Image (spheres, helix red, strand yellow):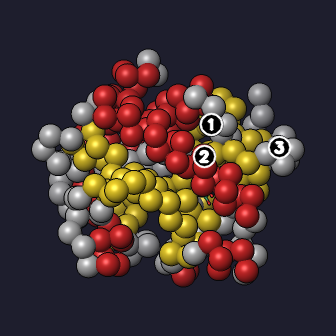
Amino acid sequence: MPTKTNILNEGKSKIVYETDDPDLLIIHYKDDATAFNGEKKGTIVDKGVFNCRISSALFDMLKKAGVPNHVVQNLNEREQLVRRLQIVPIEYVVRNRIAGSLARRYGLEDGPDLARPMLEFFVKDDDLGDPLIGREAILILGMATAEALDEGGAYSLKVNDLLKSFFAELGISLVDFKLEFGYTADGDLVLADEITPDGCRLWDAKTGEKMDKDRFRKDLGKVEETYARVADMVGSALGA
Ligand code: ADP
Ligand code: MG
């Protein structure tokens, strides 16, 4: 079993370790929570455990449905062994309803369904505040290839179809979410990073109650309880 050697990078919510195998990394999920590009910082007790469980279960389900990902195996309740990827420095965001930065950007009310799923690209760069970027700009500036955008975009929409119906069965509306992709040493594009309530908007389908990081961002209370509940719902639905 590969063992940790040194820290490759410590991000806002995870620590990524190199291992004695150059192709494998260990991802450790922390309890740290940040919002507004790091302006607001806090701790959500056991978020790391809940997110590790949620992401593992969802990635597993997506893999069975034909979306490959970086996870090799889970090591413990906070850590996964993953394939080392060349991360595409673009965040792929899929939206089903108006919320968040889409609402702010165009002065719209939160809530309405979009006519169809909307894929947006953002530059993965905290110093720049992860700005929205168009396909042409990405290509002209050489930030990613057309293949990475097309293949990652197609995977993103497939993930949306699968997750939207999965969460609908749990009585949860999948409003929007962010994905990252990366290339394996063999040149295959696979899903990377995580899918958790940190990077998704999940609203109770009946009451509209927020079941994601917006509870932390907006000080809505019951933050820990909500992560625990999502982890329980996802875990029991997927037998994880
Ligand atoms: P951030 O503050 O950028 O959100 P995180 O705390 O989420 O960072 O830490 C995860 C970091 O590890 C991110 O930069 C992410 O792109 C990167 N990462 C995720 N999966 C992999 C992988 N399989 N190989 C290399 N880097 C990865
Ligand atoms: Mg992150």
- Packing grade of label 2 (10 A; few <14, some 14-19, many >=20) is many
Circle 3 SS class: loop
Which residue is disc 3 drawn over? Answer: 23
Left or right: 102, with 66 as reference point: left
Residue 48 higher or lower than 15, as above or below: above
- Seen at 21% across and 42% down, the residue is 204
| Real-space CA distance between mark 1 and mark 2, rounded to the nearest whole angstrom | 7 Å
> What is the three-letter code of the residue carrying label 3?
Asp
Left or right: 75, with 162 as reference point: right
Circle 2 SS class: helix
Does mark 3's beta carbon lie closer than 8 Å to ligand 1? no
- Seen at 77% across and 28% down, the residue is 1
Left or right: 230, with 199 as reference point: left
- Packing grade of label 3 (10 A; few <14, some 14-19, many >=20) is few
Circle 1 SS class: loop
> What is the three-letter code of the residue carrying label 1?
Val
| Real-space CA distance between mark 3 and mark 2, rounded to the nearest whole angstrom | 23 Å
Residue 201 seen from this side: no
Question: Which sits in the foreground, 190 or 148?
Answer: 148
- Seen at 30% across and 62% down, the residue is 98
Residue 116 seen from this side: yes
**Contact, CB < 8 Å: mark 1 with mark 2?**
yes
Label drawn at residue 67: 1
| Real-space CA distance between mark 1 and mark 3, rounded to the nearest whole angstrom | 20 Å
Which residue is disc 2 drawn over? Answer: 155
> What is the three-letter code of the residue carrying label 2?
Tyr
